[in-house]
Amino acid sequence: MRDERPPRRSDGAQTHAAILAAAMRLASIEGLGSLTVGRLARELGVSKSGVFAHFRSKQRIQQETIEAAGEVFEREVLRPGLTRAEGIARLHGLCEAYLSYIERGVFPGGCFFAQLLAEYDAQPGPVHDQVCADQRSWLSLLEGEVRTAQQHGELDPDADPAQLAFELSAPVELANYLSVLYQDPRFVERGRTAVRAVIANAASRRRR
């Protein structure tokens, strides 16, 4: 597919990255729909024309912001989690990496994609479709590691992998929402406790 992004001079790369960083921060708090040329210009203290020169449209701002946030999620959650051994260790690793990403306040509004899901879950369109794809990818990743753990004899072989993936995803996402809502890191610890309980319960039922 032909890339329609406006060409950027190399000396503008840092400015472009700074705009995207601001866009991710704002979207995590105010929502992706808040991202306009004017809003970003005010946030950064620059002219609208300066922002417009980098993106040309609100749609392009939104698209590139989602892409940039995806790179952050990969760096902060997926890569650290996937360094663990397959199976139970990786399930713990992925959930812990997600909770750490929240705990460290990588985005001030919590997980960028959790905010995106809350904003676009009932709005049809390309952003909704992207949210669906990303959520399916996360759950599929957890489900795949559950299946691997079952094959290794670490978890109950009769357990439903999709159900266990759901039960692991639910507490980490709720920990994200409540820790931001109440500005209370204890909810992250509650998420950790719930993850350990789900895995331990499934492990206790494995065949001996």
Image (tube, grey):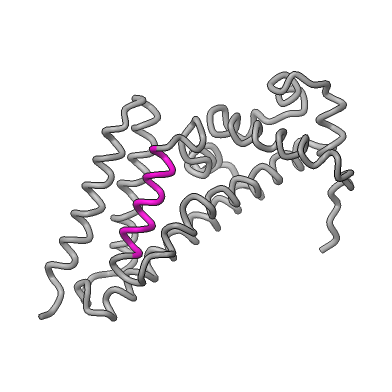
Q: Quadrant of residue 40?
A: top right
Residue found at x 71% / y 45%: 64
- Quarter of the image with the N terminus in it: bottom right
x then y, percent, for residue 84: 37, 65
The residue lying toward the viewer, choosing from 152 and 159, is 152
Residue found at x 50% / y 30%: 108
The residue lying toward the viewer, choosing from 18 and 6, is 18
User: Vertical placement of 129 versus 27: above or below?
Assistant: below
x then y, percent, for residue 101: 43, 43
x then y, percent, for residue 22: 65, 31
Please report the bounds of the magenta region as a residue range.
90-103
- Quarter of the image with the C terminus in it: bottom left
User: Vertical placement of 175 versus 144: above or below?
Assistant: above
Please give left or right for residue 56 compared with residue 151 in the image: right
Q: Does the magenta stretch include residue 89?
A: no
Q: Main secondary structure of the magenta part?
A: helix
- Residue projecting furthest to the front: 11
Residue found at x 33% / y 76%: 148
